């Protein structure tokens, strides 16, 4: 028996034989084409169009966050810049296969150098290129294997198109050597409730047919397990399945301390599923979907319609809406199309909105109108607030437009350190742990080469969260968590111990978090949080919290 460690997604456990992801197609030859440039151009146009339509169809079938990612990939496949790059190579006599391969590789390098959101898109380019080349060759695109029996999928990483449509009757669990807790693979795995361990570097040693146990709660893949270990894993899986069917109750600790469990949503259409899975409201509604696919800002009327649809789904419940979080890392021509050398530190979030204040004013107008037409409890917050002055600016402006509850997102260390002053003015704070971790550890959260640093368990991040929790307690203001950290059940307990008053996450994570909170009192949570804070790194903080949780559990774990 041996253990391979990584980052677990959720609390699931599964066992079965390994099946490895198929290898990429070999690189095309640079030999001259025997066809004319026009003939090759027609071949490329047909192949690219077919792949784009396939990605869109997969997205429509998958829905949710997967649909957003796949639609972005489809747009990428037909990007005019790529089209020009391919055309240049075809004009030089290259084959369609090589032109696609070489143009995509060049474009990938450019996006990687830009970092941020575009850097993450670079990783998706490989998948799109492989699919186009496979279509040109008339062969299946590399993807998820089908050995004919249920299996544990092992891969370097998964393309969004593959993750989105995994057959959960066949894929027992997912193990990747790359990626971190906020990678697309991790986010989509959490959304689909797939048992997963990501960033497991040692998984390169696993071979087809090896029997393994994948324990997401521990972040461990056990190889060559004994019969007793397999039986214990099966018992745990059955216990979790039973817990998942338990009655939905409001989020709370074992001593009755309420911890509202809310949903992160990207479109109003996700509201029904969130309610069905036990969401007590919405802790983060991302409004970007209205803007990112548009050539100009949506009208007040268009926005009001979407916001009204969302609010109507949560009568009497809290709905926290984030105004447009875009800028240099999610470029919008009508917001800020200027090139920036370091977009992660550029004109984004509230900075971009202040530079184009009409867009912010129209969004606040639409939100206030939707609020007046429904009976949900609307809260509105600004993204990427870095200073006290920015928080005052947004809070005042939101109140001028009739927003009753106005707050800010804490995503950079400066606002965490000044949370006592920010919360003396703003109505609430919501901590975005993905970006807070990125800026605290100086590691681009979408860049695979530094994924190991993107871990919200790091004590530096936890200390900043404690600062915000303390400020909220002093001023009597709510402090929510809406980053991926809230979906980690044990970390959720730590966050509550640090002062978080609500947790928001992907709806599929609600059951695990609800069950784990019920095992600990508020005093337990504070002891567990203190143990994590005493550690020197993310891994040791996680281990310390796990040990403290075992000793400080009001209700024994299943």
Image (tube, helix red, strand yellow):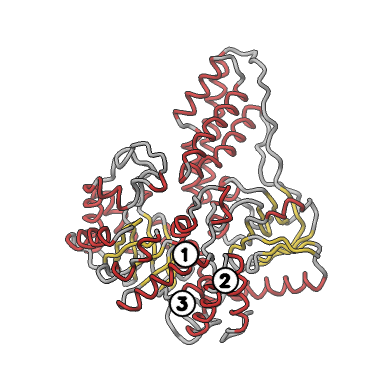
**Quadrant location, the N terminus:** bottom right
Taking the spot 53% from the left edge, 47% from the top edge, the residue there is 447
Q: Residues within 10 Å of mark 1 (few under 14, many from 20)?
A: many
Relative height, residue 43 to residue 121 (above, below): above
Residue with the mark numbered 3: 251
Q: Quadrant of the C terminus?
A: bottom right
**Among the 4 quarters of the image, the one containing residue 410:** bottom left
Q: Is residue 528 above or below residue 299?
A: below
Seen in the picture, residue 34 relative to 505 is either above or below; the reply is: above
Q: CA distance from mark 3 to mark 2?
A: 28 Å
Q: Number of callouts in the render?
A: 3
Mark positioned earlier in the residue sequence (2 or 1):
1
* Residue 78 numbered tag: none
Percent across and percent down for residue 276 are 47, 68
Q: Is residue 228 left or right of residue 292?
A: right
Pick whichever, 133 or 529, lies toward us. 529
Assess disc 3: are there few (<14), some (14-19) or many (≥20) residues with their C-alpha within 10 Å of its C-alpha: many
Cα separation between marks 3 and 1: 13 Å
Q: Secondary structure at mark 1?
A: strand
Task: Please say if the residues under marks 2 and 1 sit with CB atoms less than 8 Å apart.
Answer: no
Mark 2 → mark 1, Cα distance in angstroms: 26 Å
Task: State whether residue 33 is above or below residue 127.
Answer: above
Q: Which mark is residue 535?
A: 2
Residue 370: x and y, percent?
Answer: 25, 59
Which tag is nearer the camera, tag 3 or tag 2? 2
Would you call the spot at circle 2 few (<14 residues within 10 Å), some (14-19), or many (20 or more)? some
Label 1 sits on residue = 505
In front of the other: 375 or 456: 456
Question: In this orientation, which residue lies closer to the viewer: 276 or 441?
Answer: 441
* Marks 3,1: beta carbons within 8 A: no
């Amino acid at each position: 028996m041996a253990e391979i460690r990584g980052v677990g997604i959720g609390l699931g456990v599964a066992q079965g034989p390994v099946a490895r992801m198929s290898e990429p197609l070999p690189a095309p030859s640079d030999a001259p084409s025997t066809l004319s440039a026009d003939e090759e151009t027609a071949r490329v146009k047909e192949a690219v169009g077919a792949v784009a339509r396939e990605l869109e169809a997969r997205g429509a079938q998958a829905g949710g966050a997967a649909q957003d990612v796949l639609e972005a990939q489809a747009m990428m496949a037909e990007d005019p810049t790529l089209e020009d790059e391919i055309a240049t190579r075809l004009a030089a006599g290259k084959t369609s296969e090589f032109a696609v391969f070489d143009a995509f590789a060049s474009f990938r390098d450019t996006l990687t150098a830009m970092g941020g959101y575009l850097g993450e898109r670079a990783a998706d380019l490989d998948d799109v290129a492989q699919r186009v080349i496979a279509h040109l060759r008339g062969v299946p695109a590399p993807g998820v294997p089908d050995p004919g029996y249920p299996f544990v999928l092992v891969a370097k990483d998964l393309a969004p198109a593959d993750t989105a449509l995994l057959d959960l009757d066949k894929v027992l669990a997912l193990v990747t050597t790359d990626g971190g807790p906020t990678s697309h693979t991790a986010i989509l795995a959490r959304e689909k409730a797939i048992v997963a361990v990501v960033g497991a570097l040692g998984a390169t040693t696993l071979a087809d047919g090896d029997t393994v146990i994948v324990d997401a709660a521990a972040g461990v893949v056990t190889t060559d397990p004994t019969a007793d270990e397999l039986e214990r894993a099966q018992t745990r899986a059955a216990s979790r399945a039973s817990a998942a069917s338990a009655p939905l109750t409001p989020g709370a600790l074992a001593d009755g301390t309420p911890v509202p469990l809310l949903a992160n949503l990207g479109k109003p259409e996700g509201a029904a599923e969130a309610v069905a899975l036990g969401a007590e409201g919405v802790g983060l509604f991302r409004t970007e979907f209205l803007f990112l696919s548009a050539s100009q800002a949506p009208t007040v009327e268009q926005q009001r319609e979407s916001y009204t649809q969302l609010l109507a789904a949560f009568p009497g419940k809290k709905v926290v809406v984030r105004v447009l979080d875009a800028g240099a890392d999610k470029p919008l021509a009508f917001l800020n199309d200027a090139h920036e050398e370091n977009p992660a530190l550029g004109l984004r979030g509230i900075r971009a909105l202040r530079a184009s204040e009409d867009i912010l004013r129209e969004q606040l107008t639409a939100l206030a109108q939707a609020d007046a037409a429904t009976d949900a409890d609307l809260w509105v917050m600004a993204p990427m607030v870095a200073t006290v002055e920015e928080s005052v600016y947004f809070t005042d402006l939101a109140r001028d437009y009739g927003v009753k509850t106005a707050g800010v997102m804490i995503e950079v260390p400066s606002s965490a350190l000044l949370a006592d002053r920010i919360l003396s003015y703003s109505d609430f704070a919501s901590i975005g742990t993905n970006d807070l971790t990125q800026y605290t550890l100086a590691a681009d959260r979408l860049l695979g080469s530094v994924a190991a640093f993107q871990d919200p368990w790091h004590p530096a991040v936890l200390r900043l969260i404690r600062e915000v929790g303390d400020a909220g307690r002093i001023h009597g203001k709510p402090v929510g968590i809406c980053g991926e950290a809230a979906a980690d059940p044990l970390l959720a307990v730590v966050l509550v111990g640090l002062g978080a008053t609500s947790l928001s996450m992907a709806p599929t994570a609600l059951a695990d978090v609800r069950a784990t909170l019920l095992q600990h009192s508020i005093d337990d949570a504070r002891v567990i949080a203190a143990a994590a804070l005493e550690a020197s790194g993310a891994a040791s903080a996680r281990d310390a919290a796990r040990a403290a949780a075992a000793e400080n559990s009001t209700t024994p774990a299943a």
